[in-house]
Image (cartoon, rainbow, N blue to C red):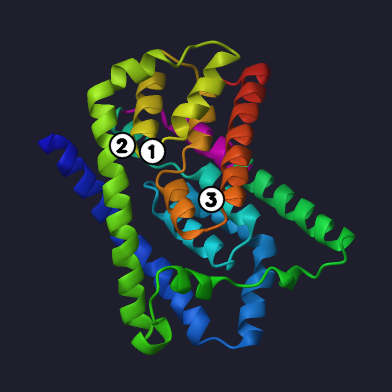
Amino acid sequence: MLEVIIDTLVDSIKLLPFLFIAYLIMEYIEHKTSSKAKNIIKKSGKFGPVIGGFLGIFPQCGFSAIAANLYAGRIITLGTLIAIFLSTSDEMLPILISEAAPIGTILKILGIKLVIGIFAGLAIDVVIRIKNLNKNKKEDENEEKIGEICEHEHCHCGEEGILKSSLRHTFNIFIYIMIISFILNTVIHFVGEENLSRLILNNWLLGPIIAGLVGLIPNCASSVILTQLYLENVINMATMISGLLVGAGVGILILCKVNKNAKENIKIITLLYCIGVISGLIIQAIGIQ
């Protein structure tokens, strides 16, 4: 249990700078930028999935944490959020490097996640824009909801100032992540990673489906399990990528905390899972190894 507590603290503390940056950006946009500047930020969202895809491939799940907060405040688009979630590498890259995996293999995996993330993100944003046009809606009708985050936490950000309110939000979400992570780490400790790995079969259909479910675990354990199983030749690349695409680290956890629309959160998680599994099946059919 001491190891569980230490892992929980280390994983949670790693996220602190990313969480603080996310809330600092949101508070600044809410209190300091003009309406014209806000519109520029929103319109740049058309290229958001491309930028988000590249940011997501950096190790750790910090950018997925930032993305969840920014999406809840409606600063970035749904396509950008999905692009970051899909491309997020979490613990995968450090493990591949530490195990001396071939550079070509590492670049191939990162490239596949990047391309799928960008393509899916752009496609989602295009579909949403077409849908809004068909309903005679303007794109900017998707109003910011930064203020709603403050209302839900019953804070007085306008009175506290940008720095203090950013620290308050960071602390609140940090405590939430730490509690949930401790529960997850405890469950994984008693269930055992070996037992979880036995659930993932090197089956062309069941493999990606089950790997996607493992990827939904809002914890770095999922990327560790999937990457190690791939390196040990227990699962193939398609199965691993299915799970890694779905696995967005604590991004999903934070989204469910800060975005109060539960129905929307379920749709986003379902969309993420379907993209991951379908992508894995396609990769398997193409025969990429």
Separation of marks 3 and 1 at Cα, in angstroms: 15 Å
CB contact under 8 Å: marks 3 and 1: no
**Residue at x-position 53% and y-position 32%:** 108
Q: Amino acid at mark 2?
A: Leu
Give above or below for 128 relative to 181: below
Percent position of residue 113, x then y: 55, 38
- Please identify, in this view, whether the residue under mark 3 or under mark 2 is nearer the observer: 2
Sequence order check: which comes first, mark 3 or mark 2?
Answer: 3
Q: Is 216 situated left or right of 5 in this image?
A: right
Name the residue carrying label 2: 184
**Residue at x-position 65% and y-position 49%:** 121
Our reading of the magenta stretch's main secondary structure is helix
Q: Is 142 situated left or right of 168 in this image?
A: right
**Residue at x-position 33% and y-position 38%:** 94
Instruction: Using the image, tell me which numbered label, if any, was put on residue 1.
Output: none
Q: Secondary structure at mark 2?
A: helix
Give above or below for 52 relative to 154: above
The 10 Å Cα crowd at callout 3, few under 14, some 14 to 19, many 20 or more, is many
Q: Amino acid at mark 3?
A: Ile
Is residue 204 among what the camera can see? yes
Name the residue carrying label 3: 84
